[in-house]
Amino acid sequence: TELIGIAQGKYNVAGQPLPNDICIEVDKDSDTEYPTTELAEFFKKNTILPQKRTITKTLNKTILKGSKDNIIINVLEGSQYNLPEANISIGYLEISGEKFSRDILKNAEIEITLEMSESRDLKATVYIPMSDQQFTEIFKPSELNLPISKLKSDVVELNEKLDYEISEAVEMEDYETAEELNSLKKEVSSLKNNTDKLSEDDVTNDKNRLESNKREIAQKIDDATKDKRLTKFKNEYNENKEWCKEIIDDNGNDQDHKIFNEIISKEQSFLKSITPVKILEANDELLSLGSNVLWRTPSFLEGRFKRLIEKPQQFNDQNRSKSLIEAGNLAITNKNYDRLREINWDLISLLPKSAQKAARDGKIGF
């Protein structure tokens, strides 16, 4: 199942701004943490409506034609840093394998387009290139779109997430947090019992009440574990700072050093913040700076070229890629690194869209 996040606002002269992030729920690709989902920002808080954007995702499993396996696009309103269960689902699009004209293989690309009008109507469109099929649904902001089956699965996952967070807090000897989380066990158990009683065709207000209850409990879990996530972001910042400093010391110029010093000069303020926004912005700035320096560095350009051509079958234009590989080898022989940089970028443009970002990144492999 591929899960995907959203927001709302007030009117002004220029249009209606979003008071919260618009996100999609996505599977968290981690082998070390409890398997769960997280939010990927689609529209940022305070952007002006109307808005339209398309992103590309890949499927994490094969969906057979005619099967009951689903692609699920869950659009949520609320901070991208919240637990998904703490935000409001404002658009839920479920596409069954029964609707596909062919098997959709693992790692196949899907294109997700969200359009939000000034009145906050949401149009969600999913295009699947492999089957050349498009699915569209429109959601009204006044309607609760989360199906009961999804509410039930959210509650099960919330219960499992709570158990995981309790065990991790105990392992870290954070008994205060463990006790705070343990106090929520009875609430989650009661919520699960009540949602289990709901039928799929329930037309009472029980679904709305229980969905609201679920978000309240998720927010309590989120609040109790915020310090842990802040610590994680701070550790990532320190790792990225050391990585970037090493690159600049080895290959940077005076301007690179100036930009680096400007970033870290502000760290005392944002490292004391109780929200991760500024820390994550600094992380992005360090990653961007380090990557920019690397893309001027001959050894990196040669290494990236060799990595790109390890699997030539991945390029979507074989004739073009063959020509670029020949030109790249010639550029290395002639030590023409400006040309090699151009060739690397051209090769990256021939990769599947889902692989292009990682290939451009100086730190993360692909």
Image: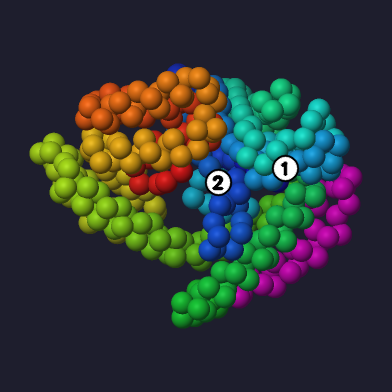
- 10 Å neighbourhood of mark 1: few (<14), some, or many (≥20)? some
Q: Amino acid at mark 2?
A: Leu
Q: Which residue is pictured at 36% across the width and 56% down the height?
A: 236
Q: Vertically, is 13 above or below 143?
A: above
Element on which disc 1 rests: loop
For this rendering, which residue is in front, 21 or 100? 100
Q: Vertically, is 38 above or below 9?
A: below
Which x, y percent locates residue 184?
Answer: 63, 70
Which x, y percent locates residue 124?
Answer: 66, 28
Q: Which residues are magenta?
A: 182-207
Q: Nearer the viewer, mark 2 or mark 1?
A: 1
- Give the residue at mark 2: 39
Checking the image for residue 309, the label placed there is none
Quarter assignment of residue 274: bottom left
- Give the residue at mark 1: 62
For this rendering, which residue is in front, 279 or 296? 296
Real-space CA distance between mark 2 and mark 1, rounded to the nearest whole angstrom:
23 Å
Q: Specify whether residue 304 is painted magenta.
A: no
- Asked whether the residues under the numbered discs 2 and 1 touch, taking CB atoms below 8 Å apart as contact, a structural biologist would say no
Quarter assignment of residue 141: top right
Q: Which residue is pictured at 61% across the width and 49% down the height?
A: 27
Left/right placement of residue 202 relative to residue 317 reads right
